[in-house]
Amino acid sequence: MAHRILILGGTGDARILAARLAHRPDLELIVSLAGRTENPAPQPVPVRSGGFGGVEGLRAYLETGAVALVIDATHPYAAAMSIHAVEACQAAGVPLLALRRPPWSPVPGDLWQEVANVAEAVAALGATPRRAFLALGRNEVRAFEAAPQHHYVVRSVDPIVPPLAVPHADYLLARGPFTQADDRALLAAHGIEMIVAKNSGGAATYGKIAAARELGITVILLRRPQLPDVAAVDGPEAAATWVDGLFPVSPATAPHGADRGE
Ligand code: NAP
């Protein structure tokens, strides 16, 4: 019987991990999405969507579905889901691995200001009108209505509906990855003076950080939430290797050609 693995997703890393393991016939993979994005990126394995109903709901899902392993590959700011995963896995006796993408660290030339939350980010823009680039989720940008003096450029995967109740805002619909060159051109074209972003880590959204350094733009970074201390790896390849160790590929289940070094 195949080992059923639940990958808590919503990130590119979850998608890459699923693709890396999808060829194994002895694994049954399911990617779980929060269901917030209207047009989520396609996944290489079956998907379930929407909340589980808290810790109890997830525990029941794991037990009913005979899940053999959970991999928490959620976004580093999706702390509630990560905490629920720990508690539900403990209750159901299911092993848990977290895929924790390391945060970006400042390098010489970076002008970073770290803040604890979105309200602090709004305050950090200051009283003087600025042109600010918001690289945040659509729920988070709403807080910037409290500072209507600024001109906002908002980049999001889904449309900001209704638009922000501010006099000056431009909206860009886009899904990463974004290159440094494209982001530099975008920041320059919009005359951006400040960026507000999360410290997501990884390469896909680092372009704006590197471009800000080039252009001398201040980046207001939301500090990462505290995440539970669990067995963790730092990327999809390491996670796949960890799974290979837990559920070794046997000659009987190896995909065609795998035992001949192809
Ligand atoms: P959250 O605060 O950790 O989760 C809130 C609830 O959403 C969870 O309790 C769970 O509901 C449900 N949920 C979250 N991820 C799920 C998943 N992979 N599968 C099934 N249900 C899931 O996360 P959030 O509200 O989505 O986002 C928090 C921060 O992370 C925001 O800054 C957001 O922009 C960022 N972020 C999240 C995602 C994502 O895919 N979630 C992607 C990119 C960025 P139940 O309690 O009902 O199970």
Image (cartoon, helix red, strand yellow):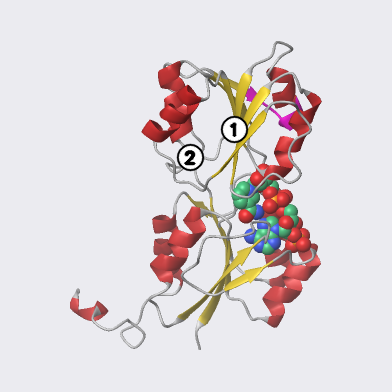
At 68% from the left and 66% from the top, the residue drawn is 89
Residue under the point 50% across and 84% down? 2
Left or right for 89, reference 18? right
Judge by depth and name the residue closer to the eye, 32 or 196. Answer: 196
Is the distance from the Cβ of mark 2 to the nearest ligand 1 atom less than 8 Å?
A: no
Q: Position of residue 122 (x, y in %)?
A: 73, 24
- Report the residue marked by disc 2: 205
Q: Hey, which quadrant is residue 220 in on the image?
A: top right
| x, y percent for residue 186 | 47, 30
Front in this rendered view, residue 63 or 213: 213
Residue kind at label 1, given as amino acid type: Ala
> Is disc 1 placed on a helix, strand or loop?
strand
Give the quadrant of ligand 1: bottom right
Q: Is 255 inside the magenta-drawn segment? A: no
In the depicted structure, whether residue 53 falls above or below residue 204 = below
Q: Is residue 127 left or right of residue 238?
A: right
Q: Quick one: quadrant of the C terminus? A: bottom left
In the image, residue 82 above or below residue 7: above
Crowding at label 2, few (<14), some or many (≥20) Cα neighbours within 10 Å? Answer: many
Work out whether residue 67 or residue 151 is closer to the camera in this orientation and state it.
151
**In the image, which residues are magenta?**
114-119
Which residue was labeled with disc 1? 197
Contact, CB < 8 Å: mark 1 with mark 2? yes
Asked whether residue 228 appears in the rendered view, the answer is no
Does 118 lie within the magenta span? yes
Label ID, residue 15: none
In this rendering, would 9 be left or right of 239? right
